[in-house]
Amino acid sequence: MSLLWSIVPTDSIFATEIKDTYLLRSVPAAEATMILSDVGGGMGKIERLLSTNPNDYLRPEWQPGCLVRLADFNSDSV
């Protein structure tokens, strides 16, 4: 058990953040799987790449944060 001695109110220290909820899609890409978030306009942002092939992580077009067209993938929601 720990004690916290502070003049700052505990509500400020242990405040919970409200995170935006957004839809993620899991899409197959070659032998990898991408986790995409919908950014509108038929585009998705790569949030995460799942692959057993180390070379997939070196592909510049598959880096997290890159935009891809959702129409290029047959996607399912996570």
Image: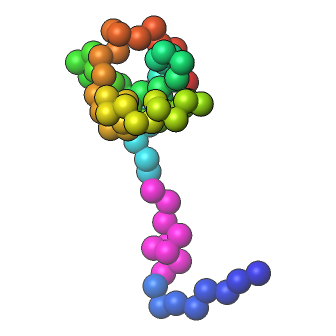
7, 71: nearer the viewer = 71
Image quadrant of residue 58? top left
Q: Is residue 24 visible?
A: no
Residue 65 percent coordinates (x, y): 32, 38
Residue 31 percent coordinates (x, y): 54, 18
15, 67: nearer the viewer = 67
| Residue 12 shown left or right of residue 5 in the figure | left
From what the image shows, is residue 69 above or below residue 22? above
Residue 30 percent coordinates (x, y): 48, 15
Total numbered labels: 0
Numbered range of the magenta stretch:
9-17
Q: Which colour style is shown?
A: rainbow
**Residue that sits furthest to the left in the current view:** 41
**Residue that sits furthest to the front in the current view:** 55
Residue plotted at (37% across, 31% down)? 59
69, 61: nearer the viewer = 61
| Residue 40 shown left or right of residue 30 in the figure | left
Q: Is residue 26 magenta?
A: no
63, 69: nearer the viewer = 63
Residue plotted at (45% across, 73% down)? 12
From what the image shows, is residue 28 above or below residue 46? above
Q: Dividing the image into 4 quarters, which one contains the N terminus?
A: bottom right
Residue 70 percent coordinates (x, y): 34, 15
Residue plotted at (46% across, 85% down)? 8
| Residue 64 shown left or right of residue 33 in the figure | left
Residue plotted at (45% across, 8% down)? 74
Image quadrant of residue 78? top right
Q: Is residue 46 visible?
A: yes
